[in-house]
Image (cartoon, grey):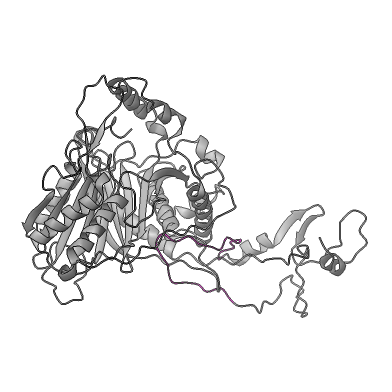
Amino acid sequence: MSRHCLSGDEPESVHMEVHLPGRLDPARLRAAFRQALLAHPRVLVREVPGRGHRRSYAWELTGEPDGDPVRFAGCGPGALARVRARALADCPPLTVSPPMRLDVVEAAGGTAAPEPPAETGRAGTGTVLLLTAHHTALDAPSALRVLATTAERYSGTPALPVPGRVRPERPDPAPGGTGGTGRALRTRPVRVAPDARPAPVRARAVGNGMLQADLPVPRRAAPAGSLPPWTVNDQLLVAAALTVGRWNASRGRPPGPVRITMPVDDRPRGTEMPMGNGTRLVEVAMAAEDPRDTELLLGERPDPAALVRLLRTTARRTRALKATRGSPWGAGAGLLTVPLLPVGIRGVLTRGARRAAAPWTSTVLVTNLGRVPYGLDFGDGGRATAVWFSAPARMPRGLSVAAASTGGRLHVTLRWSRALLGDAAGAELAGLFGEALSAASSAPAPHPAPVPHPASAPPLVSVPSDGSHRSDGSHRSDGPAAEPHATAGAADGDGEADGEVDGEVDAGARAARDRASGPGGPHHRDTPRPDTAPGAAHSIRDHRERPS
């Protein structure tokens, strides 16, 4: 599918940066990178030339690199900027093995890397390894695995075992096939509003823009004695949805459902990791379950209770999507990949289908590598202090958000199509994303749901046994208070708690919540009521103590 839709004005490239505090020996680095390519032979692939009437594209493993993919870009204030611009404009060709290149930039006076000074005392030195890969052949986890093997070969020390991903089984199903409600799936997702440039100027713009941010890993509040109910990945999804909503509102666009494409990687991360494009794409609908929450979330300061509800809904949807197996492309894309027609005709059909489906394309792509599982220790060059990467941002989506965590910091990259946003608009959008992620990090801890005894039915009323019931319907609670904040774990960890979320609400909202409608009409939750079971003549105490 990607091969059919390639175009010169929007590169299908994955760029990855590894920042090191020291300098590297050029000869040793070339040899280490070559050894890493030989250790992962499926990276050494190229497209076999052919005519348009063939039934499918042909690929071959070369066993050896066609050339030297390592290039030293020198040093200076503009060296890294030039290499980044090349990574976003010039994609490695698929006809040359491997479809990737490694640029090495030396920092001079700390101007190459936008990171804090290294703690090793070598503040005036540093190296940036910038790896650019063709996304049709390789993805970001594969590129990171190649760099990790390069570090092992360069330092000469075997790497520690890489722990596998831990995803607990979740019994709760997804609300919909793409992780959303039926209302959100039947509605076209909103598009990111273009900037204020004239439409002809935007139409002539080519390439991608990019902005990187170094942020603290978001905190995940949790009740005492339990795990956070949502992950850092869920917070990134919510932050992206809030960013798009606030950006569109500032441009006069009406609010609507935001759909986010999220890559899921189930491969092992050790040396046995299959190279290639191994992630599966799923779509997460970010519409709030209560439409009234939309106005509460898009204010200058999102309502804490509405934010908690959106985080809980997002966590439930992403857990179900991660546990789901199968092809994410659907029947239509599967039909276009069947080699019944020549690739030339199928390419025309695929590009036409892509243009027809443009209004239903997701709003934004959010990809999160989580905590980098590799040490990336280059010996005398030092260990990696930061890892940045970016994903393609082709139209009609036009915006991607990529994140990775290293050393307790979250390195976020926003990449956009210049046909959608200019550099000034991209910087403003990045500022909105930082504010939204900070709000998601400050979400209050939800209260855990009570767990009933398995041998008894849930009580109909809540009457304190210590005589603390008051005439106004409230009661004293002597239980432990929930911790307002908890330390964040891994960026790609899954939360365990899935209880009811009350959030922080005012007195009026709490009083409204305490009243419910039942068979006998409105009642207070703490008001004693008779047993309404058919033929029942038991007291409330007897009803609570008898088996269900």
In the image, 129 versus 197, the foreground residue is: 129
Q: Is residue 10 magenta?
A: no
Q: Which picture quadrant has residue 43?
A: top left
- Per the picture, the main secondary structure of the magenta-coloured stretch is loop
Choose top left, top right, bottom left or bottom right for residue 261: top left
Residue 546, image x, y percentages: 85, 65
Nearest the eye: 548 or 359 = 548
Rendered residue at 24%/21% (across/down):
52
Q: Residue at x 50, y 65 (%)?
A: 228
| Residue 184, placed above or below residue 512 | above
Q: Is residue 514 left or right of residue 447?
A: right
Q: Nearer the viewer, residue 534 or 160?
A: 160
Residue at point 25%, 40% (across, down): 12
Quadrant of the image for the C terminus?
A: bottom right
Question: Which residues are drawn in magenta?
Answer: 481-504
For the image shown, how many numbered marks are present on the structure? 0
Q: Is residue 453 above or below residue 310?
A: below
Q: Position of residue 32 (x, y in %)?
A: 16, 58
Residue 486 forms part of the magenta stretch: yes
Image coords of residue 450 (percent x, y): 66, 66
Decide if residue 198 is in sight here.
Answer: no
**Taking the image as drawn, is residue 240 in sight?**
yes
Whole-percent x, y for residue 17 in the image:
22, 56
Report whether 500 appears left or right of 545. left
Left/right placement of residue 180 relative to residue 371 reads: right
Name which residue lies at 46% across and 58% down: 302
